[in-house]
Image (tube, rainbow, N blue to C red):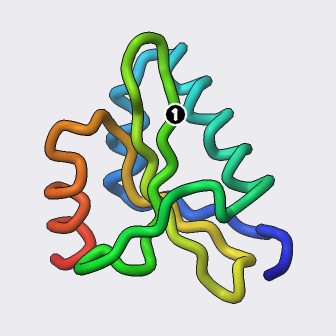
């Protein structure tokens, strides 16, 4: 696996990020940097979300989830979704399989 050269945001991720408060966006940026430093930091999902990894991090008092996937031998990072746990996996699965 090589260095991550490109980060691609899905339209869903961009909408969700826009709705976050400024402090939550800074936490998200730190989470993305952590993933870029070590792409295996998130937990791999199975079933219909196979290939997707989810990184959990704290933002204030709530736990946030960030779904991503590596492509092109680990040089491209696709950011799929960010949000709280409630309905996160259901909405992610709908988005990926639409």
Q: Residue at x 37, y 52 (%)?
A: 81
Vertical comparison of 39 with 62: above or below: below
Which residue is denoted by mark 1 in the rendering? 57
Depth check, front residue: 37 or 45: 45
* Left or right of residue 71: residue 3: right
Residue 3 pos. (x, y %)? 85, 71
Q: Residue at x 68, y 63 (%)?
A: 39
The furthest residue to the bottom: 73
* Left or right of residue 17: residue 15: left
Q: Quadrant of the C terminus?
A: bottom left
Q: Residue at x 51, y 49 (%)?
A: 55
Residue 26 pos. (x, y %)? 61, 24
Vertical comparison of 63 with 32: above or below: above
For label 1, count other residues whose C-alpha is less than 10 Å away and answer few (under 14), some (14-19) or many (20+). Answer: some
Residue 38 pos. (x, y %)? 75, 57
Residue 71 pos. (x, y %)? 60, 82
| Quarter of the view holding residue 70 | bottom right
| Quarter of the view holding residue 41 | bottom right
């Amino acid at each position: 696996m090589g260095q991550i050269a490109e980060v691609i945001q899905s339209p869903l991720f961009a909408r969700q990020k826009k709705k976050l408060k400024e402090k939550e966006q800074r936490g998200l940026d730190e989470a993305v940097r952590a993933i870029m430093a070590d792409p295996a930091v998130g937990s791999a999902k199975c079933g219909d979300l196979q290939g997707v990894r989810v990184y959990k991090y704290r933002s204030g008092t709530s736990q946030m989830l960030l779904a991503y996937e590596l492509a092109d031998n680990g040089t491209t990072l696709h950011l799929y979704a960010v949000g709280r746990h409630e309905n996160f996996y259901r909405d992610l699965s709908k988005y990926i399989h639409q």
